Image: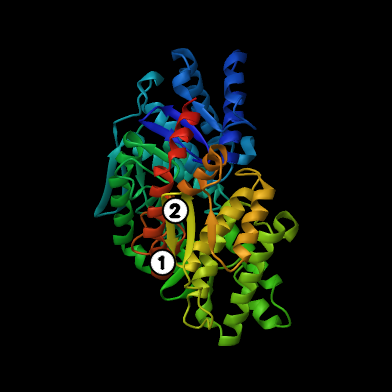
C-alpha cells in the first residue's frame, strides 16, 4: 500500500497515506519516554521505505507503543490542537483504527471493554453495542463536533467527551432537536461508507477482522436506525451528505466541505466573462454546501465542464505551479470522478473516447479497456509519480503525461524493473480499494453508475493482473524485509 504499519502479521495492518504514516510515527515517538532505541525504531522509516512492523518489537516495546498511541489519541480529543496535523475528524477516524487494532492484540495487556454501550435515539429506538464499539462511535462524534469543517460545536463536543469519560456508557439523543440531529447525519453516513462493507475485515486503509469485521454489522444497524428516526425526514439530502455537487439525478459528487469549497473557487477562476455564473459557483461557499448543475442552462453547463477539464489539465501539467490547492494524488483521484461524471452527462456533446486502451504488463499479460478508463488510470499514474509523498519521480510522470497526450493509448510496463513496478503497486491497490466493490455505482465520495459502476470490473481485473505479475512476489519480499 502507500504505507504499511503492521500491528500483527496476517491479522491486522494499517495503510494510510504517506504523510499520515510519517506524522503518526513522529507523534508516537514524541510520547515515548526514556527509550531512545525505540524512538529510533519509530523514526527510522521516515523519508525511507514506509513500513513499520510491531512484530519486530519485544513485549515491553510493544506495550510502550500502545500506551503512546492511546496517550496521543486522548491528547488530541481533549486538547485538539496539541497535534495540529491531527486536529480534524478525518485524522481521528484513521487513528481510531490503529488504536483499536493495537488494543485487540494480546500483547497490549489491555483488551477493549465488552461492557454494553447504549445510544437512545428516541422513545422507541435504542442501539446497543459492546463497549469498545460504543466508545469508537462516541470518539468519532467528539471529533466531528470539534472539527470546524464538520459539526463545529465545541460545547457539545465537551458534553460528549464527559459522557465518553464516564462509566455508564449511555448516550441519549432523544432530546436533540431536528437541526442538531441532521448535522450529526454526515458523520453517521461517513462511518457507514468507511465500515459498512468491511464484514471480511478489509477496510479502506486497514485490515483487521477483530476490529473492522466486528464494526460492520453494528455500523450498518446504527445507520439504519438513524434513517428510521422521525427527524430524518426533516433532513434534506444535502445535509445527509454534508456536501453535494449534483451533476444530474444519476450522478453526484460528495467530497469533504474543504475540497467542495476549493473546487468551486477553482472553477470560478476558470470562468471568463460571465459574472453571473461565477456568482452561482461561489454562492454555496460558507453557506449551504450544495451546487446543482441542473440549475444551469446549456451554455453555463458547457462552461463549467470546460472549466473543470481546463483546471484538471493545468494541475496535471504544471502541478505545484498551477496555483491550485490540488497538487497531490488524492486530489486528482477526487477531481477525476467529477470530471468524468460531467463528460458522461447527456448535455455534454463530446462524450469520453470509447477507443480501447492497452497496458502491456509483460510478454504474456495485456490489460485492455475503453479509452476513457485507460485515460483515467493514466491520469492517476501521472499524479502518483508527480506527488512527492507517493512515487516522487517527475521524469517518469512527464513520460506518462506524454503517453496520455498521444493518440495510441498503449502503455508498455514490461520493461519496468522490479523496483519501479513495486513503487507503482500502492496506486493500483488504492484504486482497487476505491472502486473495486462499487458495482452499484456508489463510491466513497460519488454516485454514478456510468462512471463508478463502469470502473469496477476493469479495476478488479487490473489489480489481479498486477498481482499475478512475476515482479509482484519481489514486492512482498521487499516489504517483509
Residue 478 percent across, percent down from the top left: 50, 30
Q: In this picture, is 245 found above or below 84?
A: below
- Res 46 → quadrant: top right
Q: In this picture, is 181 found above or below 252?
A: above
* Residue in the picture at 47% in, 52% down: 431
Look at the numbered disc 1 and give the secondary structure of its residue. loop
According to the image, what is the colour scheme of the structure? Answer: rainbow
Q: Give the label on residue 74, or none.
A: none
Residue 471 percent across, percent down from the top left: 47, 38
- Residues 273 and 232: in front is 273
* Residue in the picture at 42% in, 59% down: 443
- Residues 113 and 105: in front is 105
Q: Give the label on residue 434, or none.
A: 2
Neighbours of disc 1 within 10 Å: few (<14), some (14-19), many (20+): some
Residue indicated by mark 1: 235
Q: Residue furthest front?
A: 363
Mark 2 to mark 1 CA distance (whole Å)? 27 Å
* Residue in the picture at 62% in, 76% down: 306
Answer yes or no: is residue 201 visible.
yes
Do the numbered discs 2 and 1 sit on residues whose CB atoms are within 8 Å?
no
- Res 10 → quadrant: top left
Amino acid at each position: 500500500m502507500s504505507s504499511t504499519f503492521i500491528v500483527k502479521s496476517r491479522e491486522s495492518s494499517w495503510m494510510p497515506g504517506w504523510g499520515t504514516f510519517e506524522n503518526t510515527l513522529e507523534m508516537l515517538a514524541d510520547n515515548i519516554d526514556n527509550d531512545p532505541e525505540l524512538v529510533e525504531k519509530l523514526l527510522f522509516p521516515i523519508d525511507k521505505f514506509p513500513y513499520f512492523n510491531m512484530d519486530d518489537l519485544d513485549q515491553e516495546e510493544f506495550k510502550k507503543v500502545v500506551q503512546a498511541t492511546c496517550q496521543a489519541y486522548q491528547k488530541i480529543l481533549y486538547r485538539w490542537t496539541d497535534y495540529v496535523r491531527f486536529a480534524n475528524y478525518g485524522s481521528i477516524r484513521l487513528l481510531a483504527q490503529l488504536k483499536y487494532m493495537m488494543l485487540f492484540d494480546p500483547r497490549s495487556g489491555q483488551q477493549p471493554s465488552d461492557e454494553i454501550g447504549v445510544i437512545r435515539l428516541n422513545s422507541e429506538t435504542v442501539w446497543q453495542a459492546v463497549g469498545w464499539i460504543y466508545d469508537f462511535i462516541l470518539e468519532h462524534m467528539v471529533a466531528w463536533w470539534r472539527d470546524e469543517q464538520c459539526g463545529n460545536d465545541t460545547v457539545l463536543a465537551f458534553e460528549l467527551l464527559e459522557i465518553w469519560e464516564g462509566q455508564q456508557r449511555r448516550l441519549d439523543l432523544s432530546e436533540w432537536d431536528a437541526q442538531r440531529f441532521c448535522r450529526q447525519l454526515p458523520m453517521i453516513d461517513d462511518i457507514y461508507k468507511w465500515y459498512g462493507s468491511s464484514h471480511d475485515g478489509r477496510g479502506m486503509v486497514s485490515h483487521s477482522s477483530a476490529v473492522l469485521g466486528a464494526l460492520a454489522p453494528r455500523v450498518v444497524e446504527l445507520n439504519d436506525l438513524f434513517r428510521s428516526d422521525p427527524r430524518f425526514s426533516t433532513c434534506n439530502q444535502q445535509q445527509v451528505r454534508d456536501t453535494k455537487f449534483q451533476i444530474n439525478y444519476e450522478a453526484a459528487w460528495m467530497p469533504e466541505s474543504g475540497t467542495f469549497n476549493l473546487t468551486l473557487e477553482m472553477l470560478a477562476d476558470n470562468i471568463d466573462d460571465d459574472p453571473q455564473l461565477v456568482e452561482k459557483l461561489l454562492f454555496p461557499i460558507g453557506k449551504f454546501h450544495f451546487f446543482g448543475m441542473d440549475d444551469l442552462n446549456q451554455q453555463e453547463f458547457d462552461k463549467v465542464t470546460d472549466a473543470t477539464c481546463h483546471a484538471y489539465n493545468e494541475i496535471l501539467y504544471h502541478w505545484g505551479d498551477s496555483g491550485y490547492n490540488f497538487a497531490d494524488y488524492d486530489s486528482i483521484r477526487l477531481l477525476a470522478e467529477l470530471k468524468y461524471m460531467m463528460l458522461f452527462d447527456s448535455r455534454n456533446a463530446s462524450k469520453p473516447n470509447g477507443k480501447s486502451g492497452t497496458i502491456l504488463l509483460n510478454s504474456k499479460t495485456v490489460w485492455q479497456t475503453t479509452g476513457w478508463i485507460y485515460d483515467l488510470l493514466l491520469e492517476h499514474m501521472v499524479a502518483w509519480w508527480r506527488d512527492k509523498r507517493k512515487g516522487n519521480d517527475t521524469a517518469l510522470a512527464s513520460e506518462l503525461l506524454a503517453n496520455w497526450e498521444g493518440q495510441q493509448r498503449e502503455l508498455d510496463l514490461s520493461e519496468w524493473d522490479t523496483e519501479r513496478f513495486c513503487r507503482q503497486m500502492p496506486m493500483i491497490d488504492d484504486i482497487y480499494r476505491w472502486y473495486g466493490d462499487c458495482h452499484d455505482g456508489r463510491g466513497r465520495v460519488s454516485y454514478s453508475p456510468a462512471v463508478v459502476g463502469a470502473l469496477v470490473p476493469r479495476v478488479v481485473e487490473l489489480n489481479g493482473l498486477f498481482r499475478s505479475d512475476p515482479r509482484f512476489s519481489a514486492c512482498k519480499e521487499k516489504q517483509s524485509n
